[in-house]
Image (cartoon, grey):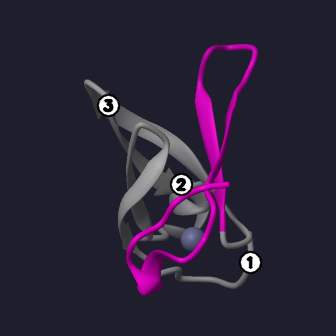
Amino acid sequence: MCEVNQPALDMCPVIYTTSKAAKVLFLGGYKYRSNGSRGAKIRWRCASHERFHCRAVVHTVYDEVVYIKEEHTTGKN
Ligand SMILES: [Zn+2]
């Protein structure tokens, strides 16, 4: 099971690699798209960003959530 240290991050991230080698992250009922990576760290942006300018951001390191800013501009995407 995933190990999340901080209570605020108490959600297991689920990461898929699509056929285009693009990664998507599902977390807390939201879908995120990879927005660049550096080493093992990946920055994710809510999939609603393009359409709704959603500002939610997640950072993961080795597929573990290390940072999350849940500022969704809409409901579930
Ligand atoms: Zn969002």
- How far apart are labels 2 and 1 at the CA level? 15 Å
Report the front residue among 6 and 13: 6
Q: Is residue 5 above or below residue 8?
A: above
Residue 69 lies within the magenta run = no
- The percent position of residue 33, horizontal first and vertical second, equals 55, 44
Nearer to us in this view, 44 or 74: 44
Q: Where does the N terminus fall, quadrant-wise? A: bottom right
Residue assigned mark 3: 37
Q: Magenta stretch?
A: 1-27
Query: Can you tell which quarter of the image residue 11 is in?
Result: bottom right
Say which quarter of the image contains residue 43.
top left
Q: Mark 1 or 3, which is nearer the eye?
A: 3
Provide the secondary structure element on which disc 3 rests. Answer: strand
Name of the residue lying farthest toward the top: 20
Q: Amino acid at mark 3?
A: Ser
Task: Provide residue 74's location: percent of width, then percent of height.
Answer: 63, 83
The residue to which callout 1 is attached is: 76
Neighbours of disc 3 within 10 Å: few (<14), some (14-19), many (20+): few
